Amino acid sequence: MIFRPMQDPTSSTWTYLLADEATREAVLIDPVFEQHRRDEALIRELGLTLTTVLDTHCHADHVTAAWLHQQTSGCAVALSRTYGARGVTRPLDDGDTVSFGRHVLAVRATPGHTAGCLTYVLDEGVMAFTGDALLIRGAGRTDFQQGSAATLYRSIHERIFDLPDTCRICPAHDYNGRTWSTVWEERIHNPRVGGDARERDFVGYMDNLALPHPKKIDLALPANLQSGRPEDGLVPGEVTWGPVTVSYAGVHEIDPAWVAAHRDAVHLLDVRDPDEIDARLPAVDGALLIPLGTLRDRLDSVPQDKPVVCLCPAGRRSAMAATILHKAGWEAVANVRGGLFAWVRDGLPL
């Protein structure tokens, strides 16, 4: 199985990508709105098909990217039926299952942090994606969204701690750089709910946390009840001048065939050194030549009336050129995917 945890540094949210290696079917758990393009790029680069986006609960600290992924991939959107959220194409109940290839996520209701919290258990106990119900050496707050410390205690003990000792605990958040734990560790060492902690101990602990109001709750909750759909219904940051994609490395890229077919619509910036231009890799007709090492000092030479497309032999130095231009204020800029090697390989005009 393919397994990739990714964190949003602003909200400390863990997003999990899981995929079947044979069928390439994938699911994404707890995606963050601002990280949509990053996650989409990884799915594309690994050659996966996103079938379902799942949220463990209706988050109060970030907006989900569920709607965005549904718009760009056509995947199903899954969330607890309890919330009645719009845009959910697969409302989930306790006991349901979500399959991807040979793998299965079993849905367990684990309310307490909120009334609709779910835990997704992979393949009968390999991993458990616990959302904010059970955290690493902690548990989710219970003071809003119909939360209940007593309910959460029972959810953890009856629906999570009954999983195999080796089951990996993968929470939706960690604020201390920790990645995962196990059922055994949390059952023994969790200071809130583990060891000999009784329900009364846990309730007393949780009722006296005195945590501040979540900063984004007034924005996040209404948005998440729409599956993260913006009010204008538009995908933010969508490039309109050409079929630009963003790689997992964060580079804006465009296909060389499109560039060759739309030469009059863009400025082509060749960032090779002059001695690299030869019969094997000649210059593209009309390209502006500015070696990468001098680009920062020659920004005034780069026009801004059309999108700028950067080019070099392998597409590596030109990726840096695109980044330099982006940071300097160029909005319409991209790197030719695969560089001149791909250009020549595709038989495009030079």
Image: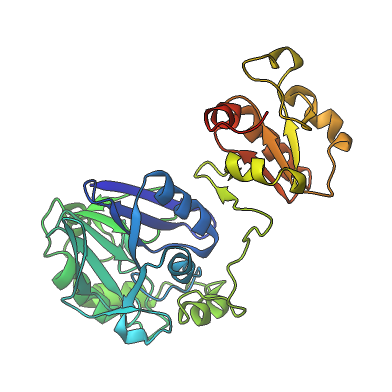
Q: Is residue 174 visible?
A: yes
> Which residue is rendered at x = 50% and y = 70% of the image?
63
311 to the left or right of 235: right
- The x and y percentages for residue 117 are 31, 75
Q: Is residue 16 left or right of residue 304?
A: left
In the image: residue 258, left or right of residue 155: right
Q: Quadrant of the C terminus?
A: top right
284 up-or-down from 27: above or below: above
Inspect this view and state whether residue 252 appears: no
Q: Is residue 331 above or below residue 105?
A: above
Q: Along the line of sight, which residue is nearer the eye, 207 or 22?
A: 22
The single residue placed furthest to the top in the displayed view is 275
Q: Nearer the viewer, residue 288 or 46?
A: 288
Residue occupying the far right of the picture:
300
Q: Position of residue 25 (x, y in %)?
A: 28, 55
Please tell me whether residue 101 is drawn above or below residue 119 in the rendered image: above
Q: Quadrant of residue 153?
A: bottom left
- The colour scheme of the drawn protein is rainbow
Tag count in the figure? 0
- Residue located 76% across and 16% down the image: 274
Q: Is residue 1 above or below residue 119?
A: above
Q: Residue at x 72, y 44 (%)?
A: 326
Task: Please tell me which residue is depicted at 45% across the width and 76% down the height of the picture.
Answer: 227
- Return the residue nearer the eye: 340 or 226: 340
Which is more toward the observer, 75 or 35? 75
Residue 267 image point, x, y percent: 77, 41
Q: Is residue 317 left or right of residue 167?
A: right
Q: Could you tell me residue 73's position as x and y percent? A: 42, 63
